Every structure is written in C-alpha cells, then in structure tokens.
Image (spheres, rainbow, N blue to C red):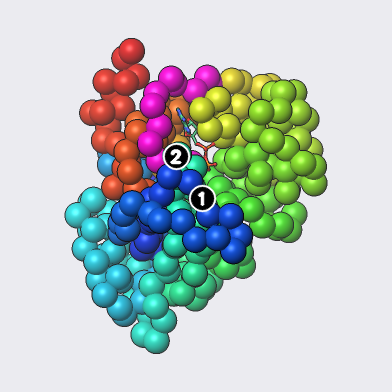
Amino acid sequence: MGRVFVAGSINMDVVATADRHPRIGETVAGHAVLYFPGGKGANQAVSAAKLGAPTTLIGRLGGDAFGHELRTFLAAQGIDLSLVRETAGAHSGTAVITIANTDNTIVVIPGANALVSDDDVVAPALAKGDVAVSQFEIPLPAIEAFFRRARAAGATTILNPAPALECGADLLGLVDILILNETELGLLAKTELRDTDDPARFVEAARSLRIGKDGVVCVTLGKRGVLALVDGEPLIVPGRPVKAVDTTGAGDCFVGAVAAQLAGGHSIREALSYGNAAASLCVQRMGAAPSMPTAAEVAVVSSR
Ligand code: ATP
Ligand code: RIB
C-alpha cells in the first residue's frame, strides 16, 4: 500500500451556531460556540488516516495553546506528524465559522499556515504508489514544489484548489486529479457556475482546464454528488440521500477518501464512489476533522 502525504493547513475552527446568518451590519443571537480541529490539510489527512491509509501531514502550527491541542488530536488519529513544525512567533491557523440551517460561512486567519515553505514540503521521501495531496490554504509556490517532487518520485498528485484562488498553468500542469466544487471550477474556467446548473455546463468547464496529461477532473456538487471527467468522459456518482447537519469538511472528507483509495491500489472509479459514501457520513455530524468516518462505517453505508 502507498502512503498519503498531505501538505496543507491546520486550523482550530471556532464555530458559532444560530438559526440564521446575520445580514451585514446585523447581530443575531446564537446557540453555542464550539471548538473543532479543522483546516483543509488536517481534515484531509484525518479522513485518509481513519480510512486506513498510512498518512503523513506536512504543515505548521503556532507555539500556542491551539497548536498543542491540535497536535494532540491529530496524533490520536494515527497521523505521522514528524513534518509538522512548530513556528515560534506565529499563532496557529484559526477559522471563524457560522453555521445556520447546515450552511456555513468561514473566515480563515492563516497564521502559521502562511509560513509553510518549499523547504517544508520537499522533506518527505515520496515513492511510486504514494499519493501527494494539497489545497490552497498554504502558499502556492510551496504546493508547486511539493508536486514537482511528487512527480519526480512517480507519486500521484491530487489538488483541491480551495478556497477558490486563481493559479498559474505551471501548477495545474502538475496535477493528476483535480477535485473542486462549482465555485472553484467557475473561477479556474473563467465562467460563472451554480450547483444547480445542468451537468453539461460542468463538463464543458472541466474540459477547458489544462491539468496534467490523462488527468481526472472531479467536481463535487454537494447533495447532488460528484461529476467527474475520467478518460475525457463524464461519470456521475449520485449523492446519497441523508439528513445533513453540518457540511463543513465534506469536500475534505471526499478528497482524503479518494487519496486513501488510490494509495490502496483501487481504481479512480472505485475511489470516487467510496469518497461519495464517506462524505455522506461526514455531513451528518458536527465539526470538520472529528466528523470524518472510519473504514468500518463506510463499509456499512457502501453495502446499502
Ligand atoms: P466544504 O467546503 O463545506 O467542505 P465543498 O463545497 O468542498 O464543501 P461539497 O460539494 O459541498 O464540497 O461536498 C463534497 C461531497 O460531500 C459531495 O460531493 C457529496 O459526496 C457529499 N455531500 C455534501 N453535501 C451532502 C448532502 N447534503 N448529502 C449527501 N452528501 C453530501
Ligand atoms: O474545508 C473546511 C475547512 O475550511 C474548515 O475546517 C476550516 O478550517 C477551513 O479551513
């Protein structure tokens, strides 16, 4: 089995729940304030590790109380943290999240995540069969250096370009599997997309992206499931009918599950279906990293 290497962000999510989101300038009374380990990199690493893949996380924490708490949590999930550096003088990444009616708004303050450097990401010994995963909450030049290293080693690269940011053709050209939602696809394809659009619009936009040769583009569509371009042909994995309570981290759960499956030698089609099942469990629980399912839980859902 290959190893999953995730280079990415680690945040403490400070979550406020309320009946509805405030309008600009308005104050609303909330129900609770909750603290969950999060950050796209950490969430994806937790997802892969809980689904049985040997997983290494590469990133940075501040030397603060959140940093210690996050390290303890991540170690308990069985993730190799030898490449997570503590950064004196920086605070740990923090996300301020509002949840109302399962929808969220998120403000991320990067802190130590912004200091992840090329030196951090070229440290791991990647090999053929490994999977290298990253997202846009660490500096883009570090992601490019990480993927160059992964490519040279014969590893598979997965990019989740979230949150939505423009990026250069050089980085996209290093990507084997691009996993993104409709907002991120719209930005990269320079067109406006909504999750209610006809699948043909996503296919057209996905085809316009220039990722690596034989690359797969996979668009996550919330409760509608997943639409992918595999070998240039559209593949639809329908969403599973569940009662969502908090979708924070659903995309991360999906990315980590796909990475774990590919590291385990499964095909991309199997990986997409498995990721969809895993993410349908994630949305039924509160919080980001703590809501990632185990392999045993996904096995139960997949057999239905
Ligand atoms: P986030 O940024 O909140 O993590 P995202 O926009 O990156 O989310 P989504 O497309 O909302 O990602 O969701 C990722 C995957 O999670 C979907 O493709 C689907 O498999 C699953 N999913 C999300 N919402 C639901 C839902 N309401 N019911 C069932 N599955 C869901
Ligand atoms: O994708 C969800 C994550 O985005 C949250 O855990 C939050 O930390 C933000 O980075």
The image shows residue 141 at horizontal and vertical percentages of 61, 67
Is 246 one of the magenta-colored residues? yes
Sequence-wise first label, 1 or 2: 1
Above or below, 138 relative to 211: below
Q: Main secondary structure of the magenta part?
A: loop
Above or below, 104 relative to 221: below
Q: Secondary structure at mark 1?
A: loop
Above or below, 20 relative to 15: above
The residue indicated by pointer 2 is: 102
Looking at the image, residue 119 sits to the left or right of residue 65; the answer is: right
Query: Which region is colored magenta?
Result: 237-252
Residue 206 sits in quarter = top right
The residue that appears at 31% across and 14% down in the rendered structure is 303
The residue indicated by pointer 1 is: 21
Looking at the image, residue 77 sits to the left or right of residue 267; the answer is: left
Q: Amino acid at mark 2?
A: Thr
Q: Is mark 2 within 8 Å of ligand 1?
A: yes
In the rendered image, which quarter contains the N terminus?
top left
Looking at the image, residue 7 sits to the left or right of residue 80; the answer is: right
The image shows residue 116 at horizontal and vertical percentages of 48, 71
Q: CA distance from mark 1 to mark 2?
A: 11 Å
